[in-house]
Image: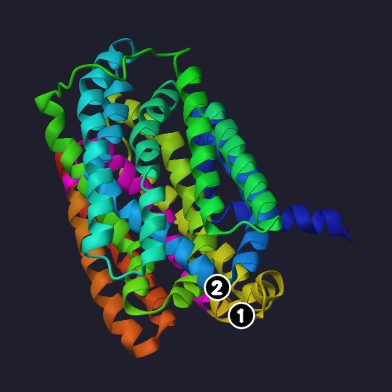
Amino acid sequence: MINSDQKTNLALSWIKNIPFLKKLFAEIRSIPLRGIKNASYLSLGNLAVQLINILGYIYIVRMLGSRNYGVYLTVSTFVEWFDFLLLGGLYTVLLREGSKDLARMHIQLESAAGIRNGLVLFSITACVMTSFFIAPYDFRTKIYIVVFSFQIIYNGLRGFYEVILQATENMKYLSLLSIVDRILFVGLSVAFLYFGFGLTALFLVSLFSNFFTLFLKYRISRRFIKFNLLAKAHFDKTLIKPTIIFSLMGLLTYFSTRVDLLMISLLGTAKDVGVYGVAFRIAEQVMMLRNFTAAAFFPIFIKRFHRGKMKGKRLIRISLIFLIFVFAAAFLASIFVEKLLPTIFGAEYQASAHILSILIFYVAFGWASMPFSMAAQSTHNEKYVLIIRSIMAGLNVVLNYVFFLRFGLMGIAYSTLVAFSVGAVLEYLISYRVMKRQGHLV
């Protein structure tokens, strides 16, 4: 008679011999160990960050209430809008080119530093002026925007040091510094709110924690590559086109996701922003894990395509692995959030639970498209990714307006889900075909 252990072994053996699953298991085993190591550092760091966030986030959201939390999200989202003036795609270009020759990376960093410093000042000025003369917010919200506009300095400079750590594959420092930042922000925020301070303290705490970790990134990155941040403005003409394309991709990514909160602040109320923001922030954390994974593997993708061709079927299998596992996780999460979220954050966030049960599925499509997006960018085909992001952004903005009028806040979640599912399909069809035709895939 066959015992239970033998039955289990027979079942596992049968599953592993299914052709499709056999290829998936083989693909998992073939993933580069360096990529797994890098992703592990970032993933474990992100896990620690999320645990710290959870401890403070629940308290912060409950203490602020949906309206004040909505104001906080409105201000931070509005300021983030002006990041596009910083040409954030510059860092992706520096990472791609710098990873090929680390000995010359400092030259590329210095050539871009002067221009970036000027863009930071221009972006802050544009943010403040727009908030007072165009934005339809109350005076208090506008003052908060002025205070928090200094966040643009942090957003504008941190990338130089993060690119160095990524290119030299020192992901552990990125994780450790993320943890330090969260400990400072959450710890000080909880303390100030406990003693009766309000939103002003929250914005100042955020700025303090970010600038403190920026200083640490500066000191640590100099161990590997030194460059002069105050170097004279000089930009390599060969980098201008890809920088603009990558920057537009970042802007269009914003229109595909984070513009949701901005549009709600314009179409609805501060309370609406707070209710949707809780669901959005939770789903966004899973997408951040996806972005960390992409950051870990991107230098490896660059070096892999720099050496030669890659099997197209391998990209497809990796994409399917992400889609299956993340979609299954999203399905399980959607079952429990309906009851769990109101218990944690309070009854006023019941609507957030309904929104999250739908919104969480867009993450699966984001993960599924990641291998094709990294491959396209590694082979200088970012313009096709730009086309796809344009379609996603346009679709999301239009559907946000139409679905919000038809379904309310739930319509914003529907819009995001449609945009990302369409984007994932286009990512596969367009990127795969282009790279196949160019000979990058076999």
SS assignment at label 1: helix
Q: Residue at x 51, y 29 (%)?
A: 171
Tell me which label, 2 or 1, sits earlier in the chain.
2
The front one of 317 and 291 is 291
Classed neighbour count for the residue bearing mark 2: other residues with Cα under 10 Å, few (<14), some (14–19), many (≥20): many
The secondary structure making up most of the magenta span is helix
Relative to 138, residue 153 above or below? above
Asked if residue 367 is among those painted magenta in the image, a careful observer would answer: yes
Mark 1 is on which residue type?
Glu
Residue range of the region highlighted in magenta in the rendering: 355-383
Q: Are marks 2 and 1 in contact (CB under 8 Å)?
A: yes
Q: Is residue 9 left or right of residue 432?
A: right
Q: Residue at x 13, y 23 (%)?
A: 236
Q: Residue at x 44, y 81 (%)?
A: 410
Identify residue for label 2: 66
Q: How many marks?
A: 2
Locate residue 17, reporting x and y percent. 58, 52
SS assignment at label 2: helix
Find residue 312 and report its image quarter: top left
Locate residue 78, reporting x and y percent. 34, 58
C-alpha span from label 2 to label 1: 7 Å
Q: Quadrant of the N terminus?
A: bottom right
Locate residue 55, reporting x and y percent. 70, 54
Identify residue for label 1: 348
Q: Quadrant of the C terminus?
A: top left
